[in-house]
Image (spheres, helix red, strand yellow):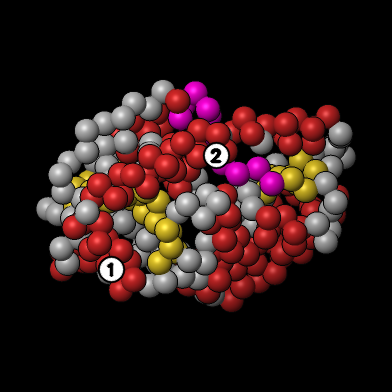
């Protein structure tokens, strides 16, 4: 069951089921509703939270994406496993090195033209590239965003093509401003960047990513801090390349799905 509603329906069947809480559903909904709050939404959240506790207690097993979420869920269920959303080993190994542009190129996978929940606040991010000498920004995954140098939008593309495309750039970034919900976040784009051999930059409160990378990624406190980092790499893109290659070697060994598959197999075998 992939969300609270599906899990609630699964409960009614009386059959064993695994609850896949990939984004700590009730916490994520709570922070969204702080942004779009109405009495009906607030009441809905209370109901979902009640259902979540029931689902966690009665599920035969629980899957989530980071230790912080898992530790909280273990108050209700002792069969909780952490299963990050990682690329397959063959996907990582088949990505060929690409010639990089001379100008520093930073890539973001996701949407920048559509409204985002508060924990994905990127207000002012694109303006940083227009107002500072920090190279180019490439955006993949936003069909509505139009290219306007130094920002280049490539739209949506299939996953394996995305990984090959990422290998053309220097830095992969998650430019979300710091937020309390980040302690429960473990976005797979960080691991796509790593697979493609990019240097990875994330907010300093994204505990799961920092831990998974064994501190090989770089962190920023705020956008002023980010601009300082990108300005440094704009002057010396080769430094970003070296760090990206080190991350890719680490990713081949540690940031692949196969390293975690036994956890899921073991959970289902225990049902």
Residue 125 quadrant: bottom left
In the rendered structure, find residue 182 and report the number of the disc placed on it. none
Magenta residues span 82-92
Query: Residue 29, can we see it?
Result: no
Give the x, y percent position of residue 208.
Answer: 58, 56
| Residue 102 versus residue 24 in the image, above or below | above
In what quadrant of the picture does the C terminus appear? top right
How far apart marks 2 and 1 lie (CA) works out to 28 Å
Query: Mark 1 and mark 2 in contact (Cβ < 8 Å)?
Result: no
Q: Is residue 2 left or right of residue 33?
A: right
Residue visible at 72% across and 64% down in the picture: 49
Measured along the vertical axis of the image, is residue 221 above or below residue 80? Answer: below
**Residue 259 point in image, percent of width and height:** 64, 34
Q: Judge left or right: residue 211 versus residue 236.
A: right
> Which residue corresponds to mark 1?
228
Q: Is residue 254 left or right of residue 144?
A: right
In the picture of the structure, the residue carrying the numbered disc 2 is 255
Place of residue 122 in the rendered image (x, y in percent of width and height, measured from the top left): 35, 65
Q: Is residue 57 visible?
A: yes
- The residue positioned 16% from the left and 48% from the top of the image is 103
Classify mark 1: helix, strand or loop. Answer: helix
Residue 207: name its quadrant.
bottom right
Density class for disc 2 (Cα within 10 Å; few <14, some 14-19, many ≥20) is many
Q: Quadrant of the N terminus?
A: top right
Residue depicted at 51% across the width and 55% down the height: 215
């Amino acid at each position: 069951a992939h969300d609270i509603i599906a899990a609630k329906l699964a409960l009614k069947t009386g059959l064993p089921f695994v609850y896949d809480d990939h984004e700590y559903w009730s916490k994520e909904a709570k922070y969204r509703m702080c942004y779009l709050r109405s009495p009906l939404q607030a009441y809905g959240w209370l109901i979902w939270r009640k259902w979540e506790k029931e689902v966690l207690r009665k599920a035969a097993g629980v899957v989530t994406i980071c230790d912080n979420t898992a530790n909280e869920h273990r108050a209700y269920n002792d069969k909780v496993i952490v299963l990050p959303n990682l690329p397959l080993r063959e996907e990582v190994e088949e990505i060929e090195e690409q010639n990089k542009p001379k100008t520093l190129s930073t890539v973001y996978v996701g949407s920048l033209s559509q409204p985002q929940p508060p924990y994905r606040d990127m207000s002012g991010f694109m303006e940083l590239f227009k107002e500072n000498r920090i190279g180019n920004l490439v955006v993949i995954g936003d069909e509505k965003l139009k290219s306007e140098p130094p920002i280049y939008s490539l739209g949506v593309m299939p996953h394996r093509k995305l990984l090959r495309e990422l290998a053309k750039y220097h830095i992969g970034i998650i430019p979300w401003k710091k937020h309390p919900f980040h302690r429960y976040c473990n976005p797979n784009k960080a691991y796509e960047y790593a697979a493609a051999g990019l240097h990875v930059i994330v907010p300093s409160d994204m505990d799961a990513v920092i831990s998974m990378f064994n501190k090989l990624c770089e962190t920023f406190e705020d956008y002023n801090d980010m601009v300082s980092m990108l300005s440094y790499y704009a002057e010396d893109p080769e430094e970003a390349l070296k760090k990206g290659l080190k991350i890719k070697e680490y990713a081949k060994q540690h940031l692949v799905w196969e390293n975690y598959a036994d956890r899921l197999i073991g959970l289902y075998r225990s049902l």
